[in-house]
Amino acid sequence: FMTFLAVAFGVALGNRVGTAIFASVPAVTPTPLPGWLGIVAVVAAGLGFVVVLRAQAQDALWIVLIGGLGVLGGRAGSAALGVELGTFAGALAVGVASAGYERWTRRPAAVVSVPGILLLVPGSVGFRGLTSLMQREAVTGIETIFSMILTAVALVAGLLIAAVVAPELRPA
């Protein structure tokens, strides 16, 4: 949480210094990226998690597949349940698929569930909320942070339901 606040403070400070040095920043209209780039991003993130989390190379394909399944579940859930609760579907997909991985390979489910959940964590939403609060846009900031909290609760609920639907193996 402290790192999160430090990043938000750094961005706010950088915006102030940048505005003081370069005057105002022109507004830019965002353009949507091509759909195929999302697939590239999920694969790159999965492979990045293999390195960062020091997973074994044999698990790289599983990490990418289950992470992609979580993202697809999250998008499908968002279309059906709304943006915040879509994370529930993604977490449920990751939890059930991780249990399947554990049964299939006899390796801990956490090997693939942790990277899969990291793809669903609502950090950018909270960041936008803190940024809004620092810009003195209290209503927007509180609404955005509430959305982040609801998304995080949906993430936990999805994992809890997955643990009931597909429990992990008990050590013998």
Image (cartoon, grey):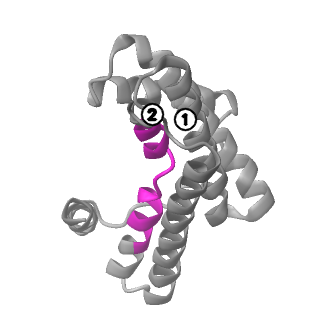
Contact flag, marks 1 and 2 (Cβ < 8 Å) = yes
Q: What amino acid is at disc 1?
A: Ala
Q: Residue 141's spot in the image, x, y percent?
A: 45, 80
Return the residue at label 1: 99
Q: Residue 2's spot in the image, x, y percent?
A: 19, 65
Per the model, the C-alpha gap separating discs 1 and 2 is 6 Å
Magenta residues: mostly which secondary structure?
helix
Q: Residue at x 24, y 67 (%)?
A: 5
- Residue neighbourhood size for the residue with mark 1, other residues' Cα within 10 Å, grouped as few (<14), some (14–19), many (≥20): many
Quadrant location, the N terminus: bottom left
Q: Is residue 67 left or right of residue 85?
A: left
The answer to whether residue 21 shows anywhere in this view is no
Q: Residue furthest right?
A: 80
Magenta residues (range)? 113-129
Q: Nearer the viewer, residue 14 or 2?
A: 2
Say whether residue 62 is magenta: no
Q: Residue at x 47, y 63 (%)?
A: 125
Say whether residue 120 is magenta: yes
